[in-house]
Amino acid sequence: MIQLIQNKKIIGAIIAIIVLSLSSWFMVVSSKENDYTPEQAIERYYKAAQNGDIDEAKKYCATEVLDYYERGNAVFTGTISAAIQDEGSKYEKVQPEKTKITGQFATVSVNLTHQGGDYKTTEDYHLIKEEDGWKLTFQ
């Protein structure tokens, strides 16, 4: 009987260790998924947009932007999907260069090469740090 109780305690301890290990691993994996720079947010947004992966691109749009489109306020640009598709087709190359972070806000100077490569420009992108990472505000 004593042997049975000791075996149950050992099994319980092993299960507890496994559960703690798995939950720690999950927390690390989850935090790394959202642990990206403003530059990476821009690169990931455009990569998804260029590949036509609208849902992935939306992950890098600020909540305020998504809400704006959801409310139907974007009369000239239509839906968020149309806006993302348009952005994805504009540029051949997107190169974030200089970044300035002030608290939860970031401004990234981005070199843009338009399709065909005959026109290049530099624009400032503004981002906000939300709970789940850096997001483009398109302001």
Image (spheres, grey):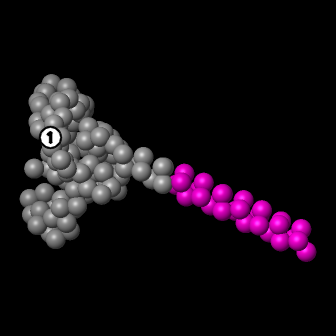
| Residue under label 1 | 107
Q: At which x and y percent is residue 63? A: 22, 61
- Which quadrant: the N terminus? bottom right
Q: Is 17 included in the stretch rendered in magenta?
A: yes
Q: Is residue 46 above or below residue 97?
A: below
Q: At which x and y percent is residue 73? A: 11, 67
Q: Is residue 2 above or below residue 63?
A: below
Number of on-image labels: 1
Q: Is residue 92 visible?
A: yes
Q: Is residue 46 visible?
A: no
69 or 96, nearer to the observer: 96
Residue at 22% x, 32% y is 96
In the figure, is residue 134 to the left or right of 26?
Answer: left
Q: At which x and y percent is residue 132? A: 33, 55
Residue at 77% x, 67% y is 9
Residue with the most extreme top position: 118
Q: At which x and y percent is residue 34? A: 37, 50
Name the amino acid type tagged 1: Thr
Q: Is 42 included in the stretch rendered in magenta?
A: no
**Main structural element of the magenta stretch: helix, strand or loop?**
helix
Q: Image quarter for residue 5?
A: bottom right
Q: Which residues make up the magenta segment?
A: 1-26
Residue at 11% x, 31% y is 122
124 or 8, nearer to the observer: 8
In the figure, is residue 27 to the left or right of 44?
Answer: right
112 or 61, nearer to the observer: 61
Q: Secondary structure at mark 1?
A: strand
Q: Is residue 68 above or below residue 123?
A: below
